Image (cartoon, grey):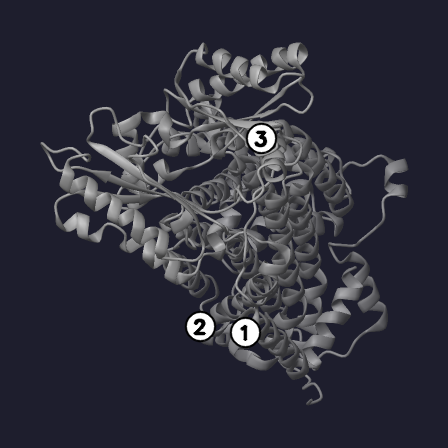
Amino acid sequence: MAAFLYKVGRFAFRRRWYVALVWVALLGLAGFGAASASTATSSSFSIPGTEAQKAFDLLEKRFPGGSADGATARVVFKAPEGEKVNDAGNKAEIQEIVGELESGSDQIASVADPFAANAVSQDGSTAYISVSYEVSSMELTDGTREALEEAGEAARGDGMTVEIGGDALQVMPETGVTEVIGVAVAAVVLVITFGSLIAAGLPLLTALIGVGIGASLITALANVLDLGSTTAILATMIGLAVGIDYALFIVSRYRAELAEGREREEAAGRAVGTAGSAVVFAGLTVVIALAGLAVVNIPMLSKMGFAAAGTVAVAVLIALTLVPALLGIVGKRIMGRKAREAAEVKDKPEAKPNMGTRWARFVLRRPVWVLLVGVLGLGAVAVPAASLEMGLPDDGSQPKSTTQRQAYDLLSDGFGPGFNGPLLVVVDTKGSSDGKAAVDRVSQEIEGIGHVAAVTPATFNEAGDAATITVVSKDRPSSTDTEDVVHAIRDTGTDIKDETGAEVLVTGATAMNIDFSEKMNNALLPYLALVVGLAFLLLMVVFRSLLVPLKAALGFLLSVVAALGAVVAVFQWGWLASLFGVEQTGPIMSMMPIFMVGVVFGLAMDYEVFLVTRMREAYVHGETPGQAVVTGFRHGARVVTAAAVIMMAVFAGFIGSSESMIKMIGFSLAIAVFFDAFVVRMAIVPAVLALLGRRAWWLPRWLDRILPNVDVEGEGLRKELASDGPPEGPSGREREPARV
């Protein structure tokens, strides 16, 4: 592989302008596709194989025209102090708004008058208008949204409190200025690392081109592939981080080759042949981890994983082709003035040990202590993970300043916490001899279940072979008591089916969330086994060792559990919540742990591959295991540190998002990268390698014969170059390549 990538690097360097133009053209085409694509018409959320999804599908068949997947809204009114909503003036005003909503858009399916639908609280202080739409929230026109937002403006002026909840006002999440700050921090880190504005700007430029292509393609295909609104944001988050890192690895190795006196084209070839090999395998681990999300069998999550994996693949291709092309375009300026002056000095004094060298030597002297401190420290941070509770965010997790959150609170105060997440029980009476009696039995059984606040009368479809019953829990939708109610109804339904033949199914947003969380929990271990197993095999091929990949996988698991502990402490327990803008604590988003595992595993392997590859390279070339560790840190610690800080800055930038899902994922990825890069890779890894010595690189002979030799450390490339003797200029000078 190293020999092939060496040729790719030299070709891209020689044909620099053609390569650059190809990538610019691809960016332009992707941008044109995104600009001309129609707006995504839907963002469906389905959970195949769950009872909630089965009930939802049954609703669409038996209640046609019911807009089961349409957007919904609740316009909530609270009367002024000392008044009631059913006072003559307030009632007339609310009923007038009902009429305005009905005539405000042709996308309206139904508008329920609160006084006819019994949607007034017992104390008369609160009422709400239920609005259903014929289309999903993504298909609502701007005019429809404006009509909804303007509803109740006159009532507000007369002293009533009016707020709007539901998914009809759902819009693309805002990421805030902190995202820009993350990129700015990355730029500062790159300038400090390279000491050159050109060298610092090149990784940023190539990463932005890669993200631009990836995000544009996602936007262009969003309507065709039914991609959710957060897909492009998550792909951007991951693509930007890995794009900067991969370019950073190539540029760093290129500068090191130039410092050894090689001509520019040769240096570009060797950089892509060695660091590029590490980039390919690091990228493969990220792609495996993201594409592996498909094993969960939740379409939305699979699409998010594939989209992000595609963006990572683009980042790898750019690092291998566009980066060496741009290195040819910028010329010697990639080194910076001080580096160029140092390269011109013939009799160079011996360089002082850098920070990476000094740290590696310290770890080699105290490996047991470093290992204990690292493991025990992460273990302590991981303790809160034992209290992990998972669910999906609703309007109760929105910032308190939003109208959705205020409507949620008004409904909770006026009608009870469970009113914000009613359960919809669907009874299929096709297999029952007496459908009405079976439905009455279902209602009676549900009323006898603890923590049930209300059960509405059953509503039959026109054919009379299905009915719906709305059940309101006494507790908030995300509580464990509400989850117990769902399971109790399902247990009761099993008995009723055995006795009457009627099938009882529970659905609704709350039941969907419960089923989703359970499915994510059940998929976590198989997913871990698949991703860690495949990556273990991949790293075994890269390092030709059994213990190094095993150590990499165990270290990753430790950093992930510690990161989960930190997430629970902040988002569930509320520690330092105000610092991170968390206004409402509660269960951890169900998809966050498995998504974090997928992303962080791939990113952790980036550091593992880049850092340990240099150690493996030094060991193969004759250094002792201890010397190889020091050599790896001397060449790689600075770059890995810069890469980790950049990733943390990019991920932390998304903590400013208004979307709780994006905020939580941004925090979890940033803290996981911190733990994995600075504790696991920088401390635990060298300590373990120091304790293992030569055993770290042991591989059974029979396995050595079976595994393909991909030559990531470039040993085969060195031999090939030594025998071919490619022309190189004298030290510090270069042979000008042919102009193209």
Looking at the rendered structure, the secondary structure element under dot 3 is helix
* Residue farthest bottom in this picture: 739
Q: Amino acid at mark 1?
A: Ala
Report the residue at 67% width, 42% height from top.
Answer: 294
Q: Which residue is mark 3?
A: 52
Q: Which residue is mark 1?
A: 343
Residue 739 in view here: yes
Report the residue at 54% width, 13% height from top.
Answer: 441
Looking at the rendered structure, the secondary structure element under dot 2 is helix
Residue 248 in view here: no
Q: Nearer the viewer, residue 353 or 613?
A: 613
Seen in the image, is 42 located left or right of residue 148? Answer: right
Report the residue at 40% width, 47% height from top.
Answer: 659
Seen in the image, is 87 located left or right of residue 641? Answer: left
Dot 2 or dot 1, earlier in sequence: 2
Q: Say which quarter of the image contains residue 222.
A: bottom right
Looking at the rendered structure, the secondary structure element under dot 1 is helix
Q: Say which quarter of the image contains residue 295.
A: top right
Q: Which residue is mark 2?
A: 197
